Amino acid sequence: MKQLRALLAIADTGSFTMAARRLHITQPAVSMQLRELEGIVGEVLVDGRREVRLTAAGDILARRAREVMTALESAGVELMARRGVVAGTVDIVAVSTAEYFVPRLLAEFGARYPDISFRLSVENRDGVYARLAEHRLVVAIMGTPPRSTPVRAVPFAPHALSFVAAPDHPLAGKHAVPPASLTDERLLLRERGSGTRDHLERYLKTHGVRPYRADELGSNETLKQAAMAGLGVALLSHHVFDIEHAAGRLARLDVQGTPVLRKWNVVVRSDLVVSTAVQTLLDFLEANGAELMRGMVARELAA
């Protein structure tokens, strides 16, 4: 089993070094386990001459190994269910804006359901769409669900976005700023494929605003830091800037038509039967997500 786990770790990460980190062992140990597995099978399983990738034999074995691992995990879950314990592992991907709160939601979830574990990753919206379309994830936490993939979306909390800038920005402190005022501003953008950028472009189009300059910076944190430094104006989720706003390091601009109000959703494919662990997470977020997120903001602002 440990040799199969090594093969799957190599397949998933494309790297002996990353596979070793995932398995919490040394890189030479991963190499040794792979050699042992190749000796058992009698085939070369990984071709590392140019880049680390599976051979045809390695691909066959990895595919079947995943089925074995899934079956063993399911057996464990079923055995625990006989004792009335909800257990299992949930694969979760969150859009990048959600990384500011999802770990804390999962910490609360984990405290209530200690026998459910999870694997969390973060991508921009288009990356999440692709993984849903390709069946490469179980649960997504995002704003706007995809339209081209059959999904079930459960809204669990409100999501507000506003324009922000440095506290000494000329528009800071003004009330009911007309959207046309943004025409003369240097706008800071997320990368293409980001939901935040999509919301900004939709707002600008709706209000007929064409800024004289727009710079792509690529991440929420970079946009926030750039706005605080006076580089320009950014549209950001309140989850991203609430602390800096409360500390007086960032000003929320009172631009008409903002905050842009959306909802956070937990999303699963509607054509798949979800496990008890996944359904437990869906029910938990639907029932408790909004209240928990309000509590997070209150604690951060009081700190």
Image (spheres, rainbow, N blue to C red):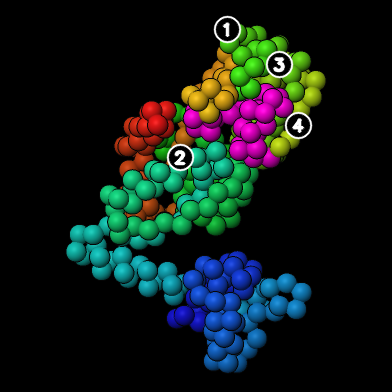
Label number found at residue 215? 4
Q: What distance separates the C-alpha of mark 4 from that of mark 2?
A: 26 Å
Please rate how many residues cluster around mark 2, counting C-alpha atoms within 10 Å: few if below 14, some from 14 to 19, many from 20.
some
The image shows residue 236 at horizontal and vertical percentages of 59, 29
Q: CA distance from mark 3 to mark 1?
A: 14 Å
Q: Which mark is residue 175?
A: 1
* Circle 4: element type: strand
- Range covered by the magenta-colored residues: 218-243
> In front: 41, or 211?
211
Foreground tag (3 vs 1): 1
Q: Amino acid at mark 4?
A: Asp
Residue 32 belongs to magenta span: no
Residue with the mark numbered 2:
101
Which badge, 2 or 3, comes first in the chain's sequence?
A: 2
Task: Determine the secondary structure under disc 3.
Answer: helix
State the residue position of label 3. 182
Q: Residue 68 sits in which quadrant?
A: bottom left
Going from N to C along the chain, the mark reached first, 2 or 1, is 2
